[in-house]
Image: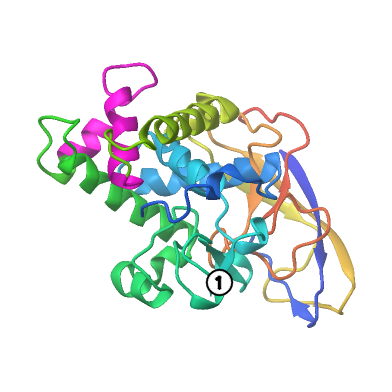
Amino acid sequence: MHRLTFVLSALLLSACFGGEAAPLDNPDLGMKASSLTAAERRVRAAQIRDAAAANGITQGWLLAGIADAETRMSHCWSELTWACQGPNSSDCGGGPVVAGAGDGPCSLRQGGLGMFQFDAGTFDDTLRREGDRVLYIAGNVAAAVDFVVNMVIRSTYVSGVDNRAQAIDWINGVRIGNGRWDPWIRTVTHYYNGCRPSYSCFSSRYAHYRDNTTGVYSEMGADFWDPTHDFAAEFVSQSFPFARDPFELYPGQEQAGYIELRNVGTEAWTPGVTMLGTTQPRDAASPIAGSDWVSPNRAATVDAPVAPG
């Protein structure tokens, strides 16, 4: 059993709280700093891992490597404020997603959208082609899965892959240094970035995707990227009222709280890895996130390892 503590913060409005807990638009985009902290990067990597697994990709670090190369895994403009502002998203607290800055002035409203930088021209063109799913973290990842599956099918560096199932199976067999590793990085550089081996940009961009992918894998650790871990919790108690008894917070007011949960899964809970997340919608940035939250969609982490039981 473990107690997670956190603070709720009222913003401009009083709030009620319930008990339920494309191809690269700008080649330099992923080479500049993001404001994501190490803890926030871990949360974002977990979102990519889990969304990829929901779409059949068990090697989520391959997608995270692309996102890291594109935007340093930043999805919201607030995480990469030197870039352009895209359309608004509830996953960004109602603010804009990050948009590529390589297609001219931001006022033209064109360039890649979100952490995977989907770009069909103007923002409207991209949303017509991809749907508004790319404005949301899980949807941006799902769109990336669709894109990489299709590029593996088309890739001249991959043989024996003719359909989605075969492509997913091939991707799930990629490991750093194995026989599929170089074809994967070549495929990403050529088909995702658009830089062919005959172009002068190929060597540097190949290295960019390779290094970001190996980097994000090492940063989080091999165990982190295993989507088969069995995590489960059982509610014990909480300090704040349930949804049936909402309470008000006034602008500028903060309210400390805690929730006690029992680890009923098979995996230990680890500080900085196991988080208390938002829901309804899942993983959305909370408008009442407190000053001590790990990120706008993660209220707290355990303060010590918690074994099953």
Amino acid type of disc 1? Answer: Cys
Q: Quadrant of the N terminus?
A: top right
- The kind of secondary structure the magenta stretch mainly shows is helix
304 is within the stretch colored magenta: no
Query: What residue is drawn where x is 90% and y is 72%?
Result: 253
Q: How is the image coloured?
A: rainbow
- What quarter of the picture does the C terminus occupy? top right
Count of labels in the image: 1
x then y, percent, for residue 125: 34, 74
**Along the line of sight, the residue nearer the viewer: 186 or 282:** 186
172 versus 80 height, above or below: above
Q: Position of residue 115 (x, y in %)?
A: 50, 54
Residue 290: % across, % down: 80, 61
At 47% from the left and 40% from the top, the residue drawn is 64
Q: Is residue 154 left or right of residue 284?
A: left
Return the residue nearer the eye: 85 or 15: 85
Q: Nearer the viewer, residue 127 or 291?
A: 127
Examine the rendering and report whether any part of residue 89 can be seen.
no
> What secondary structure is marked by label 1?
helix
Say if residue 137 shows up in the picture.
yes
Label 1 CA crowd tier, 10 Å (few <14, some 14–19, many 20+): some
Using the image, determine if residue 35 lies above or below residue 206. Answer: below
- Say which residue appears at 47% left-offset and 66% top-offset: 135
Q: Residue at x 51, y 28 (%)?
A: 217
- State whether residue 232 is above or below residue 119: above
The residue indicated by pointer 1 is 106
Instruction: Identify the magenta region.
Output: 166-194
Measured from the top left, where is residue 293 in percent x and y? 76, 53
* Name of the residue lying farthest toward the right: 253
Q: Most extreme residue toward the bottom, as rendered?
A: 13
Based on the displayed image, in which of its 4 quarters is residue 209 positioned? top left
